[in-house]
Amino acid sequence: MEYYLYGIGLILIGGIFSIFAPKRLKGWITVFFSGIGASFVSISSLPVLFGSTSFFRNFLFPDPIGAVSFVMDPLSAFFVFLFAVMSFITAIYAAGYMKSSVKTSSFFFFLNILTASMLLVVVIQNAIAFLIVWEIMSLSSFFLVAFENEKEEVYQASINYLIAMHIGLVFMICAFILLTLRSGSLDFNSFKAVFTSNKEFANLLFILFFIGFGTKAGFIPLHTWLPKAHPAAPSPVSGMMSGIMIKTGIYGILRILFLMGVPSKEISYFVLIISIISAGLGVFYALAQRDLKRLLAYSSVENIGIIGMGVGAGMLGLSYDNPLMAVLGFSGAILHILNHSLFKGLLFFSAGSVYLGTHSRDMEKLGGLIKKMPYTAFFFLIGSLAISGLPPFNGFVSEFLIYTGLFNGLKSPSLLLIASVLSIASLALIGGVALLCFTKAFGIVFLGVSRSDKGVKAVESPGSMLFPLAILSLFCVLIGLLPQYFIRLVNGPVKALTGGNEINMNGNLFSLFNTISIAFFVFIAFVVLLFLLRKLLLAKKPVSSYKTWDCGYQAGNARMQYTASSYAEPFLALVKPFINFQRRIEKPSGLFPKGADFESKDKDWVSVFFIQPAVRGISKFLDLFSWIQSGNTQQYILYGLIFLVLALFWIIGVK
């Protein structure tokens, strides 16, 4: 545990040093200290992750906090290892990305504060200390989102994010207050008895915690901050928030499940249904976007839903005493946490490279970037294939486990049978739409010809930004090709959540993964063989070069290509009632038409029908008291006099 604390200390020291360092050294100082700190933290987590022991350390703080336990068990060790590795990769990318920024000020300081708070929040097991560190995590990420606050959209997005985080915090505080009153303690271990003593009360507590943690994770309808904050934040922050920070919400839900033991069937179905809705609507909204980072943000909502489906399957397995379904569901969910961190970080970092190279996130103004930014295009393609769940990449492996867990639900009673069938069908539909979404993203941004000068003037990113993309791409491929080895990372957390059940390292599942791995290598060898054969056959033959989409016609232009909107429009027309998709068409008319226009946009149902009316209602309510702030100096003096008189009466009354 000492190495873990030393590692966090080094990360914090690196953040402090970066404030006083020259601009050109800020990023690399952060990388240096983050690398050493991440190594210390990882070293302390691996024995717990692959062993059977847990580390703990107790600290005594003044009241009202009291004794605080820092516990590294298999569940927290998984998140600690993930956060340490991904934060170090993010620091490397940020060092290259921020070179072009006019200001860096305290960027790296808050980046390291965010890293340290995430590493702490998954090991602290005292309610007040947990909430304090959770708030530090929210505030540090708020300052990172608001980094370019001179832009109006960034300012609004950061305030929206801060409000959303504190709404979630209120629900968490309420749940912890109820637990503390019942248990008489702030320690997490004392909460177990409360969860097991009363089923209805346990369900209420879980709902409160789910709202609080689910707001951070981005479950629908608690997701509205996410598609605003991610596009507004610098790309290293977007990758860190989507890749790992929102996973603290998943950690919180899993920690509560660990304390609950066996959840009720009602709560299990609740999680599964919310997750299906989140995954489905998330990918529908992602497909409708033309802003590249906003598309990736909604895709995070989708993948949080997929993780939730795995968690829901695991909870139903526990509720129905189906150990295999529980193990497979939780295994798929936890492995998808790792996989999503890798390919979503890869995609956000690639999108950041596109933005630096073109100064645009609007896909309608891009195109043909594969010629200008070939390395970025290659890495974005790997991320797109991985997030679409295609073999032989890592997204396939975790979704395969979730599918397998749901198929095991087909052997259970009628209600679980129906839920499993609907979940399998939903996951299949979501996978198909995700593939459509990312063929759109890759095709519109990187293929064809440029739609504006922004694409024509694009330049490739420097090596300091491409290196993290290469590392993330490598892991996306390795986990897909060798799943039988990486699945061992999730065995400890799954065993903790299922009460001792674990993946059989020598069973049918691992035999199946070995077979899949061999099939993937054979497929890759076949593709390489075809490529070499083609190269050999064309070695002495001249190959002519033509413009993209030439087809013998020399008068083509960029307007003849698909746009992002037109590519997705046929499918979006089918799901229009679900995503509030709107189109405006101004058709050409007359013998000599002057012009035509087409516009499509989506409106988030939650924002339109819940958030915006609530904001308007609060504004009207506050307007009733606008007379208090009149600007009249005499009136403000009167307020002070009234306060002094009331204070005097209160003092007299107390005496």
Image: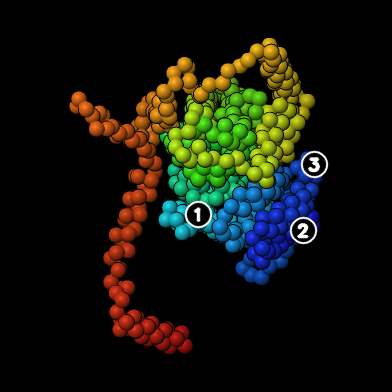
Most foreground residue, 161 or 650: 161
Packing grade of label 2 (10 A; few <14, some 14-19, many >=20) is some
Residue 494 showing in the rendered view = no
Q: Position of residue 100 (x, y in %)?
A: 58, 52
Residue shown at the point (57%, 41%) measured from the top left: 459
> Could you say which quadrant of the image residue 26 lies in?
bottom right
Marks 1 and 3, the one that precedes in the sequence: 3
Alpha carbon separation for disc pair 2 and 3: 22 Å
Q: Position of residue 441 (x, y in %)?
A: 50, 32
Q: Relative to residue 594, is residue 284 drawn left or right?
A: right
Residue shown at the point (52%, 31%) measured from the top left: 368
Residue 375 showing in the rendered view = yes
Tell me the number on the disc at residue 51: 3
Q: Position of residue 306 (x, y in %)?
A: 55, 34
Badge 2 amino acid:
Tyr
Tell me the number on the disc at residue 6: 2
Badge 3 amino acid:
Gly
Q: Residue furthest left?
A: 590
Question: On the image, numbered disc 1 is attached to which residue?
Answer: 165
